[in-house]
Image (spheres, rainbow, N blue to C red):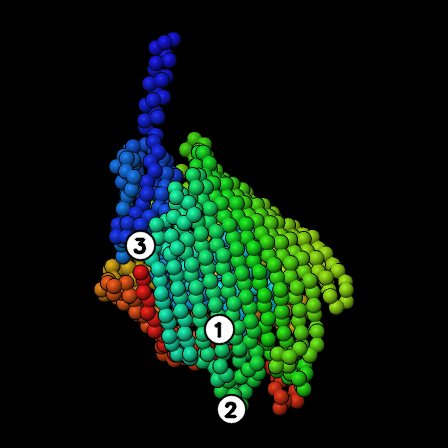
Amino acid sequence: MKNTLITCFALFCALSCLSQTATIQFLDSQSEKGMPDVKVYNHNQRVLTVSNENGTVSISGNPSDSISIRSFGYQSERLVFKSIMDRKTYSLMPSAQLVQEVTVVAQERKNLGVQSLDALTLKLLPINNAQDLLRTVSGLFIAQHAGGGKAEQIFLRGFDNDHGTDFAIFYDGIPINISNHAHGQGYSDMHFIIPETVQGADYYKGPHELRNGNFAVSGAARFKTKSRIDQNLLKLDVGDFGTQRGVVMLNLTPNNKLFTKKNYESSYLAVEGNLNQSFFESPQDFKKLSTLYRYNIQLKKTTVSSGVSYFNSSWNASGQIPLRAVNNGSIDWYGAIDDTEGGQTSRGNVFVKAKTRLSGGHSIENFIFYSKNDYTLYSNFTFFLNDSINGDMIDQREDRHIVGYRGAYRRFDKIKNMRLKSEVGYGIKYDIAKTGLYKSNQRAILDVLDRHKVWETNADVYIRESIDLNSRWTIIAGTRVDFLNGRVDDILDTTSNTITAHRFSPKFSVFYNPTETWQLFAKASSGFHSNYIKAATDNLTTSPLPGALSADLGTEFKLGRKLVSSIVLWTIQSDAEYIFVADASEFENKGSSIRYGADLAFKFQPIEELIFDWSGNMSYGELLEESEGENSIPSAPRFTSTLAVIFSPIKPLSIYVGGRYMARRPLIEDESIWADDYLILDANVTYSFKNNIQLGISIQNFLNEQWMEAVFYGESKLANETEAVDDFHFTPGTPRFVKASISYLF
């Protein structure tokens, strides 16, 4: 018996010696600062861990285990665990071989299902404003059609998403899309984001990610701001059309201490100011102020992150002009019929997130947020069609409060050779908004058309299971259920209506890696976007949560160390093309629809100094309940493509040339009217000096093409016309626009 106990004790000690845990801080070899989001993958254990804000990570394994270390922009390394077990810090070397560092192995990715190549694009391309952030999604195009302050129209996967109806956007976990907005369902205005504060983004195509939920039908984007900055920044942009932009970013914790003496803290303040008269004949007089404050603290097992942001802007707009007025010489290409359009808007956000590490690598996360949104928009789409005396200007307004909570529990388990990553998420969001629609003339209210008070509660819970069957196969499966409760008070006729609904959204994805440089995947999911509460209560046959079914079949692969590419075939079938025309306060149902297409992309780095970045996206869609020849989906893009070339002949110099192309697309169901195609080329040059000064010059549309950025087809009537006329109504795109910038880091 004694010998047996001694043997068991010796065996226990031997096993304990084999499996060990090391806590390491990863540092940038040049700045010697801690590096967040360094990915460490244990190939033997098939476990991925990621460093926290100050670069620290705990790694478990046996001394002989093979370890991969990756961080974008740095040399990846593969070594045995024994070589780093006793180290307190580990330095990573910067690398310009960006394509080489991309992995297509499913189990080595932090967020499997993310469009990884698009995340790389965000790091490569010059970002001049918040709108450019969305352009880094391959196949996603945007259009601005009401001055510089209104949210952009979004196109992706054959969807004209309007301002976000079928594309979800998140900012540090806060949902940007707004339900029952005065100007459009799912309205998502990103202009409050300061581009220099963005650390990265996760991009999704289709409704396949369980975390995204409402509005994520064609896709979604999750932007994340920097949790800390290592240097202060002063930046000034000056350009054509009265463009002036300044950015200040101040590190408030240079020693990583603010309120405590023993805990790691980080804090910074960012402020952006923007003035712009734009290229229209009538000055835009655009003014914008954005601020962001971030504070984070690392406690023993809990990381607390917080942020406060505020944004305010005002602008004038020349609106969408009729082509016939340009053709007959009544107005110029950059002229206006009613130049009193425009508006003002503001948004404030506050959030606090606490993530606690539990034993066994498990974690629990709690997140609360508050948003305040104010909005006024003046538009005149039909000029004198409905009122030949005062014109057809409308005034849309809203005053909104949003409060939300999200929680998640994540755990890691092992069953024989299988690795399981389980996640249970849950959340609730409460909106209360006062909205109004008014008839106006030159921004003076003439009549009240619509006034409502809306309460909406959205709650959800989901279960997500990621199973690594072995080193080649990974399955992600789960489902979410969303609950909706809404109430609408009509202030004009003093009526009140309520509605309750729910929807299940199962999702399934499978990933297979035949080799470390080749991945195959298939996805099948259900998603949805919510409808206007008023539309659903006015017509009980209207689904409050119309669903969509989607499937993807694709591959990602690397050819050598120089090229990485992806090919995806996809389809999306929507239960109903419910469209709420907020501009006219009308509701329209175009019936069910189907879309299908292909996404292709590659990144090629033949030499360290040169990168090619290309994408091509094809789609076709039909309205299933309309007759043949009358069933095209209006405004849906058929083909889009982007190309970027980044050349750095010497280390301080970076030259970017990029182009975006959108092919002709039908504007009405019978395809008798089409929008013209366009090809726009941009360029950007930056040079960094040793004294931390960077100079840059950018040229948008350097060939000075005359193009229509946003275009619609419908009725309108001018002051000198007696009958309504069907015509193109468009917002001209940017002519050649030159801007210079200077940045100073200190």
Q: Is residue 703 above or below residue 613?
A: below
Mark 1: amino acid: Lys
Q: Nearer the viewer, residue 744 or 159?
A: 744
Query: Could you give the CA–CA distance between mark 1 and mark 2, rounded to whole angstroms?
Result: 31 Å
Gap between marks 3 and 1 measured at Cα: 36 Å
Callout 2: SS: loop
Q: Which residue is mark 1?
A: 287
Residue that appears at 49% across and 57% down: 308
Badge 3 is on which residue? 73
Residue 648 occupies which quadrant of the picture? bottom left
Mark 1, secondary structure of its residue: strand
Q: Is residue 23 visible?
A: yes
Residue at mark 2: 329
Residue 226: which quarter of the image? Answer: bottom left
The local crowd at label 2, few if under 14, some if 14 to 19, many if 20 or more residues have their Cα within 10 Å, is few
Place of residue 83 in the rendered image (x, y in percent of width and height, measured from the top left):
26, 37
Q: CA distance from mark 2 to mark 3?
A: 53 Å
Three-letter code, disc 2: Gly
Residue 381 position in % (x across, y down):
60, 78
Which class describes the residues within 10 Å of circle 3: few (<14), some (14-19), or many (20+)?
some
Mark 1 or 2 closer to N-term? 1
Q: Is residue 355 above or below residue 610?
A: above
